Image (cartoon, grey):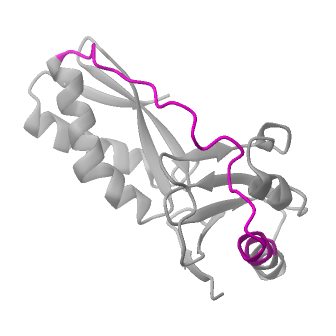
Amino acid sequence: MFIQTEQTPNPASLKFLPGCEVMVRGTAEFKSAEAAHPSPLAEQLFKISGVAGIFLSGDFITVTKTEDASWPALKPLILGVIMEHFTTGRPVMLNENAPVVSSDDDNDIVKQIKELLETRIRPAVAADGGDIVFHSFDHGVVFLQMQGACAGCPSSTLTLKAGIENLLKHFIPEVNEVRAV
């Protein structure tokens, strides 16, 4: 198994591409070892000193390190855990078949926002090792949650305002502003 790594715009996060499916559907983010119990992979990664966060997506894993940790020391340990996990065939998540929450009662504006997020924004953000999840829409303001490498990234405000906000305003006149939650 050959695992590739990619830099992200966030210097505290590194993207690991194991060359196989990581998540069957959706994403998962863990910001502590205590919260990682639904994922055997995340639990093992948190056992490495210096790991501060784990983000799991369709075909990649983003690991965020603590401020005092160094990538040259962490990277081989992380690669070893990921390789061992996938070669043993253990599941990434314990309950991957949990039902997806349906939102059929979304109004037309919210449906348009979610469609643009899904088709234009999330693929670009995933390329940088993160994700953006719709939280809510209230009085012209779209609230989004930044995950993975995007959470805490120095350029996340610019991405929200110059990129996502401009795109949403262009296609959906009812959108006045985008804010992170």
Question: Could you tell whether 2 is left or right of 171 in the image?
Answer: right
Question: Could you tell whether 42 is left or right of 165 in the image?
Answer: right
Q: Which residue lies at the image location 58% right of the left edge and 62% below the top edge?
A: 22
Give the number of callouts: 0
| Displayed quadrant of residue 78 | bottom right
Query: Magenta segment: does it hold 88?
Result: yes
Question: Could you tell whether 164 is left or right of 153 in the image?
Answer: left
Q: Residue at the bottom extreme?
A: 2
**Magenta region: which residues?**
81-107
| Displayed quadrant of residue 97 | top right
Q: Is residue 31 above or below residue 128?
A: above
Query: Magenta segment: does it hold 26?
Result: no
Q: Which residue lies at the image location 88% right of the left edge and 63% below the top edge?
A: 48
Q: Main secondary structure of the magenta part?
A: loop
Q: Which residue lies at the image location 68% right of the left edge and 62% below the top edge?
A: 63
Q: Position of residue 28 (x, y in %)?
A: 60, 45
Q: Which residue lies at the image location 15% right of the left edge and 34% below the top edge?
A: 169
Evaluate whether residue 118 shows in this view: yes
Evaluate whether residue 163 shows in this view: no
Location of the N terminus by quadrant is bottom right
Question: Could you tell whether 159 is left or right of 87 in the image?
Answer: left
Q: Position of residue 30 (x, y in %)?
A: 70, 44
Q: Position of residue 27 (x, y in %)?
A: 53, 47
Q: Position of residue 37 (x, y in %)?
A: 81, 41
- The foreground one among 38 and 152 is 38
